[in-house]
Amino acid sequence: MESQDLRNAGLKVTAPRLKMLELLEKADDRHLTAEGIYRLLLEAGEEIGLATVYRALAQFEAAGLVTRHHFEGGHAVYELERGPHHDHIVCIHCGRVEEFYDEVIEKRQRAIAEKLGFNLRDHTLTLYGECSSPACQASRSKDRK
Amino acid sequence: MESQDLRNAGLKVTAPRLKMLELLEKADDRHLTAEGIYRLLLEAGEEIGLATVYRALAQFEAAGLVTRHHFEGGHAVYELERGPHHDHIVCIHCGRVEEFYDEVIEKRQRAIAEKLGFNLRDHTLTLYGECSSPACQASRSKDRK
DNA sequence: ATGTATGCAAAACATTTGCACCTGG
DNA sequence: CCAGGTGCAAATGTTTTGCATACAT
């Protein structure tokens, strides 16, 4: 249960935090902005402040419950940390995010860091491209003026 | 000469732009923030506005003269585009940036994008780690309180 | 009770834009 | 001359913070 995650992280179990975790778990889009979480909660009739969302996300991130990504676009997106590491590919048109994992790339990264004398701690790999989803294709031809 | 680069990009050759390109070329650190460029130019006695720096950088980027990166830390860094593509490894302590290129990784990325049905357009790969430069090692032990 | 969390409003940032004035070609 | 460039100040959008109140334990 999510309350246990919060307790393990040394955080008090409060309504806003539970709602946020619940949302992060159930939302269609697993990569949400702070503003997006805020708006979705308001729409769901929850009473919450945007500042609380940011504060809670920062704590979740520190506790490893959530990962923050900085894709292009000036705002951070948050993703519930579930299971193993993966990287992302983002559609430059519709913003759809897919996840992938590639052991060959992971291995090469470790080798490169070592060769350059770095103790590798983290990495971000994001591919940007045009996706082939029908919805995206449609909106693309429509937008062409 | 830099004025030619500007002309080729359809931009007028002005003092601020030349100074910026000059700085990007000669600076010790090849990865500068807009604010950093602004400050360095002021220190060098140049008269320039921060807005001009941002505007010029945006144009340089559009012209392919410069690449913008979003490393961790809330601000963009700009790098003069010189020669072939490469990725980065950043020291989480001193911020030092090294560049690398790995054909195996590049190839895997193309394969992954194709498999997921994306037409790959761009990517960012940044490794974060602890570098082994003496200066960084020193400051690290000092900061430990 | 008591240390945390919360909401709100204000602040802090990085970046962008409006506008009147300059300037390169 | 005049489209494009510049500086300044004001606006923007995102994220952070101060503070008084409310709540979990």
Image: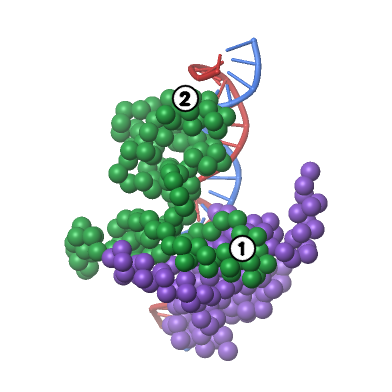
Chain colours: A green, B purple, C blue, D red
Q: Secondary structure at mark 2?
A: loop
Number of numbered discs visible in the structure rendering: 2
Specify the amino acid type for callout 1: Val
How many residues crowd mark 1 within 10 Å: few (<14), some (14–19), many (20+)? many
Location of the N terminus of chain B by quadrant is bottom right
Location of the C terminus of chain B by quadrant is top right
| Residue located 38% across and 27% down the image | A47
Residue carrying label 1 = B90
| Residue located 35% across and 56% down the image | A98
| Residue located 69% across and 63% down the image | B131
Chain where mark 1 sits: B
Q: Secondary structure at mark 1?
A: strand
In the image: residue B123, left or right of residue C24: left
How many residues crowd mark 2 within 10 Å: few (<14), some (14–19), many (20+)? few
- Identify which residue, B67 or C22, lies in the foreground: B67
Place of residue A96 in the rendered image (x, y in percent of width and height, measured from the top left): 32, 55
Disc 1/disc 2 C-alpha distance (Å)? 37 Å
| Residue located 61% across and 59% down the image | A120
- Identify which residue, D6 or B113, lies in the foreground: B113
The answer to whether residue B46 is above or below residue A43 is below
Residue carrying label 2 = A14
Q: Quadrant of residue A88?
A: bottom left
Q: Quadrant of residue B43?
A: bottom right
Residue B54 seen from this side = no
Specify the amino acid type for callout 2: Thr
